[in-house]
Image (spheres, helix red, strand yellow):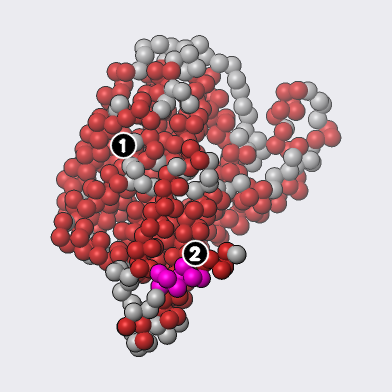
Amino acid sequence: MKRAFFFPVLLMIATPPAWATEAAARTLSLTTHNVGYAAIAIFLVAYLLVMAEEFVHLRKSKPVILAAGIIWAMIAYVYAQAGITDTVEQAIRHNILEFAELMLFLLVAMTYINAMEERLVFESLRAWLVRKGFSYRKLFWLTGCLAFLISPVADNLTTALLMGAVVMAVGVDSPRFVAVACINIVVAANAGGAFSPFGDITTLMVWQKGIVDFWAFFHLLVPSMVNFLIPAAFMHFAVPQVKPEAATERVRMKRGAKVIMVLFLATITTAVSFHNFLHLPPMVGMVTGLAYLQFFGFYLRMTHARDLPSLPYSEAKANEMVGDVTAFEIFRQISRAEWDTLLFFYGVVLCVGGLGFIGYLELLSRLMYIEIGPTFANVMVGVLSSIVDNIPVMFAVLTMGPDMSEGQWLLVTLTAGVGGSLLSIGSAAGVALMGQARGSYTFFSHLKWTPIIALGYGGSIIVHMWLNAGRF
């Protein structure tokens, strides 16, 4: 039934024109073809479903994966009718290779983050912050600064949820504090990820493409700080001058937690070294670093019950040794990776790659980066990323491959990374905190501060163009 409907539709929208018999042509321009129009429509429908994920509860990976398959099937059908059988295959293999490199890098990073979470590293930090009894204003700055410092290593989603848990625990009686603190955390987490090659998927894409050197990203440190500090300075005066009662909760990290943190740093060092000195993809170094965790996980599993029989039982000791009661298993941490995000990334790469293969991105690149100008175009990329996920936006820019200076590539990296802070729906951190602090941190509570956040956005751009003027 489905096939009987599907193929007539393909025949209707992909009827080969006169040039289809010219098999000698290796690529076809489909920008004014029915397949091109259909591909745009399919991608837009899929992305509308992605944006409506919070309302329809349909995982974002599903529509883009389906859209990717249909778009490339239509393209392949037209090329097959034209007698060109290998061009589409080579193009889609190139896109899959790009996805595979990024996916393996992210998978290793997610596995380490999950392992540290399982060893109670983040929970221990949260309990320590809650136990200290800081005032709301001190906690406002502390959670913001920690979000800025943690997100270059961990993803902004994990960072935001960790700091959000602290804010929720301390500010349970002050919704006003929770709202302002959550906005500050979102801005800080997004800004912190913008100056690190692996702090955000967009920076990772630019680094793995070899467009910007590893150390060059750190020229965005000061602009990123400006992006965070300007809104925070204004929001500081909206934080209540209250000191809540300190909690007594204590969480002890499980055995091996500190070693795993060291191994994560060693893995990042390996990835950077492989790329800078051996000219290998960073993914190779990351997967090599996964072996460090695998071997240490083997050690934890083999020794987890060594001392248990000789320990006198007590509730405190049982809590202390809980990490040894259940053996550490590396594949359990891999299975807990954000597979929906990884598969969403697959769908986006293939969808955008398909639109680029059709020829639309070349037209868009000419309009944005030649007729309008790269500076204005890159600033608009950040504004767009506050509405649309920055992953497809950045991948589209990379696929366009505009001829830009290093300063302009750093600019688009900055804007794509921090632009999502303009709206609560503009980043994974904002969406996650809206769910975690439901009722206190909302779309409209964030929108109230958007003009101030925009000041930080503009300030970071101006500071970057001033400090890094020699790179433009």
In front here: 60 or 329?
60
The stretch of residues the image draws in magenta is 7-14
- In the image, what residue occupies the spot 53% across and 24% down? 128
Give SS at disc 2.
Answer: helix
Is 11 situated above or below 20?
A: above
> Quadrant where the C terminus lies?
bottom left
Which residue extends farthest right? Answer: 309
Residue 424 in picture, x, y percent from top left: 38, 35
Splitting the image into 4 quarters, where does residue 95 fall? bottom left
Q: Secondary structure at mark 1?
A: helix
- From where the camera sits, is residue 147 visible? yes
Q: Nearer the viewer, residue 363 or 94?
A: 363
Give the residue at x 82% y 26%.
312
Amino acid residing under circle 1: Leu
| 422 displayed left or right of 43 | left
With respect to residue 79, does 180 lie above or below?
A: above
Contact (Cβ within 8 Å) of mark 2 with mark 1: no
- Up-down relation of residue 420 to residue 13 (above or below): above
Work out whether residue 398 or residue 367 is closer to the camera in this orientation and state it. 367
Which residue is located at x 33 percent, y 46 percent? 385
Residue 97 at what x, y percent from top left?
A: 47, 67
The mark found on residue 422 in the picture is: 1
Quarter of the picture holding the N terminus: bottom right
Location of residue 242 in the rendering, given as x and y in whole percent from the top left corner:
40, 11
Sequence-first disc among 2 and 1: 2
User: Residue 363 in the image: x percent, y percent?
Assistant: 25, 65
Q: Amino acid at mark 2?
A: Gly
Provide the residue designation for mark 2. 69
